[in-house]
Amino acid sequence: MALQLHELTSDAEFPALMTCLYDSYSNPYNGFWDIFKGASADECTARFTAWHNSDPTSHWLYVTDTKTGEVIGGTQWNIYKENPFASAPPSLRAYWIEEGTELRAIADQLLSNFLAGRPHRMNRPHLLIMWCGTHSSHRRRGAGRLMMEWGLNKADELGLDAFVEATDAGFPLYKSVGFVTVDDILPDVHNEDPTEEWRRLKEQLRLPMHGFFMWRPKGGRYEKGKTKFPWENKE
């Protein structure tokens, strides 16, 4: 069955896309998604829609099965034509989670820790994969590669690097399209006097989460031992 790539252009396209991501990030389980999905699918969809509409760098892609019309994959590419950290470091608090709860405290700390490393390496124009998932029933059909090709073609047209903070599940796809591993990442939270609820939530979210900070140089040209990371070249 053939696949078709689409760039999202209307709010009406978001619900089916989010349904796909709900499945993708649940199989296998992803603790970050558990935080971002919030209290309900409707609230999560409305929030992601609002974030997209307020962010001119945001580009959502999705793939459908041409026979059934089902959305089987989705990716958010952010295209930063200027340094996004020129005026301020990244900041996001989990305002969609009830204030004063242990989950809110964990979510705020996890997001802060996760975003803290971006300005050092992403402090120039670049592309970023923020979300990427394929429905668990439609993997290995080429949907992920279609969505990667769209963004990497944009990166090459603009002469920009690309980044992704990859999960273990996503790592093989990103490696196959030219991303290289900079280092492992282990997002985590810390509490010197944790409650039982804190411990329970940390276990539920499977913290620390293992992943990979990955980079694709301009044009996808990388030679091991020769290509230098651009953020390490500053005098």
Image (cartoon, helix red, strand yellow):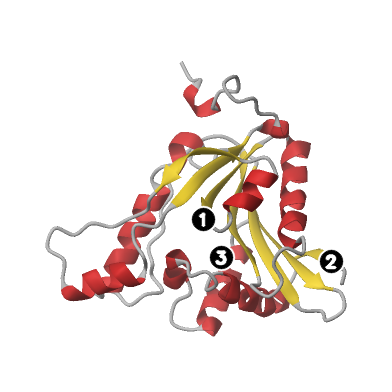
Label disc, if present, on residue 217 of the rendered structure: none
| Residue count near mark 3 (Cα–Cα under 10 Å), binned few <14, some 14–19, many ≥20 | few
- 90 left or right of 181 in image: left
Q: Locate residue 180 relative to residue 210 in the image: left or right.
A: right
Kind of residue at badge 1: Thr
Question: Looking at the image, is mark 1 or mark 2 nearer the viewer?
Answer: 1
Image-quadrant location for residue 177: top right
Which of pointers 3 and 2 lies earlier in the amino acid sequence? 2
Q: Which residue is mark 1?
A: 167
> What residue did someone put label 2 on?
4
Q: Amino acid at mark 3?
A: Trp
Q: Position of residue 64 (x, y in %)?
A: 79, 72
Which residue is disc 3 drawn over?
51
Is residue 2 found left or right of 88 in the rendered image? right
Label 3 or label 2, whichever lies nearer to me, is: 2
Residue at 71% x, 59% y: name it.
144
Q: Is residue 16 visible?
A: yes
Kind of element beneath mark 1:
strand
- Rounded to the nearest angstrom, the CA distance separating label 3 from label 2 is 25 Å
Q: Is residue 10 above or below residue 223?
A: below
Q: Residues within 10 Å of mark 2 (few under 14, many from 20)?
A: some
- Tell me the mark number nearer the camera, choosing from 3 and 1: 1
Q: Quadrant of residue 23?
A: bottom right
- Rounded to the nearest angstrom, the CA distance separating label 3 from label 1 is 22 Å
Sooner in the amino-acid sequence: mark 3 or mark 1: 3
Q: At which x and y percent is residue 15?
A: 65, 79
Image marks 3 and 2: residues in contact by CB distance under 8 Å = no
Q: Secondary structure at mark 2?
A: strand
Say whether marks 1 and 2 touch (CB < 8 Å). no
**Disc 1 to disc 2, how far (Cα)?**
25 Å
